[in-house]
Image (spheres, rainbow, N blue to C red):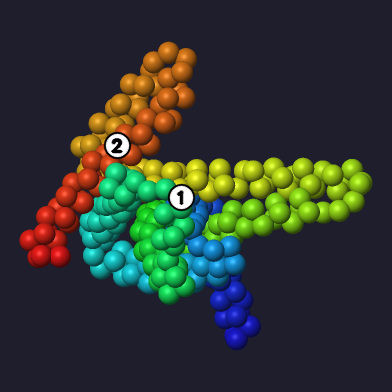
Amino acid sequence: MAGASLLTLLDDIASILDDVAVMSKVAAKKTAGVLGDDLALNAQQVTGVSAERELPVVWAVAKGSFRNKCILVPAALLISAFIPWAVTPLLMFGGLFLCYEGFEKLHHSYSHRKGQPHSETQEESELPDIKDLAAYEAEKVKGAIRTDFVLSAEIIAITLGIVADKSLSTQFFTLSVIGIIMTIGVYGLVAAIVKMDDAGLYLSQREGESALTQMNRKLGFGLLSAAPVLMKSLTIIGTAAMFMVGGGILTHGLHMIGEQIHHAEQAVAAMSFVGPVLAVLTPSVLNGLFGVVAGAVALAVMTGIQKLRGE
């Protein structure tokens, strides 16, 4: 009798694991786009810290990301069970927050360039002391974890939608698996990106005359040349991703606007031979533009509130 019960239990566990594997594979495909945005955003967020602090900063943000998942997975299950109607409004609030942060970055950068034109010598003399650097690093980590929370919420929400009709145990394990895989994947790649210049320096200093050594040196010099370009590009891509992801969340919640974007995509796809190519880009561009407008409005509202409060 006990043996039969054990076999039944093992069969149930095997069935759950099989469902989790299938659902995780589907969810991974659905959230692949968010993974790319998450990568760009977080790599951009950890730029600007000293070289020896890059990996500790990435690790600190990764730990914060795991904490985010530990909050979001149980919260998603509770919301799905008791107030499923709240998923969309919460996601939209997160999307608006991303648009706000993205536009605030653009506004701050523009105001800084316009209001404080100064030379490189002045910039060097205005470098912050070690206390300011520590505060700057802490603020970077805090901002990256805050951004990760919104993107993690989107990943969890997409995954939850895929497994909504499954059992509670399948939902829990699938959400957990996706959360762990996405976190390891994103921050493993972020760590590789931010240390690319160090790897290039190591390879470029290899000594010897063998063909393999010369190839390593060429690869090292290539990495050293590409690293600053990549990091600068990620800064731009990361900000653009804020608008595309945030705008996409908002337009998905605002069905009328989402339908108009879908119609625009279909209209572009019906054009000449370049139509299918442009149709792939159309939703991202329109979502990004909507995100810029939403971010501008959110910043204007927040600025007005701060002025009224005398801040």
Q: Quadrant of residue 128?
A: bottom left
Residue at x 63% of width, y 83% of height: 3
The residue type indicated by label 1 comes to Glu
For the N terminus, give its image quadrant: bottom right
Q: Position of residue 41 (x, y in %)?
A: 44, 52
Residue at x 37% of width, y 48% of height: 118
Tag on residue 120?
Answer: 1
Q: Position of residue 124 (x, y in %)?
A: 46, 57
Q: Position of residue 179 (x, y in %)?
A: 48, 63
| Closer-to-camera residue (293/119) | 119
| Closer-to-camera residue (219/176) | 219
Residue at x 58% of width, y 56% of height: 194
Residue that carries the numbered disc 2 in the rendered image: 289
- C-alpha gap between disc 2 and disc 1: 34 Å
Count neighbours of disc 2 (C-alpha within 10 A) and say few if under 14, some if 14 to 19, many if 20 or more. Answer: some
Q: Position of residue 235 (x, y in %)?
A: 45, 48
Instruction: Say if 102 sits above or below 257 in the image.
Output: below
| Closer-to-camera residue (305/258) | 305
Q: Quadrant of residue 65?
A: bottom left
Q: Quadrant of residue 175?
A: bottom left
Residue at x 42% of width, y 54% of height: 122
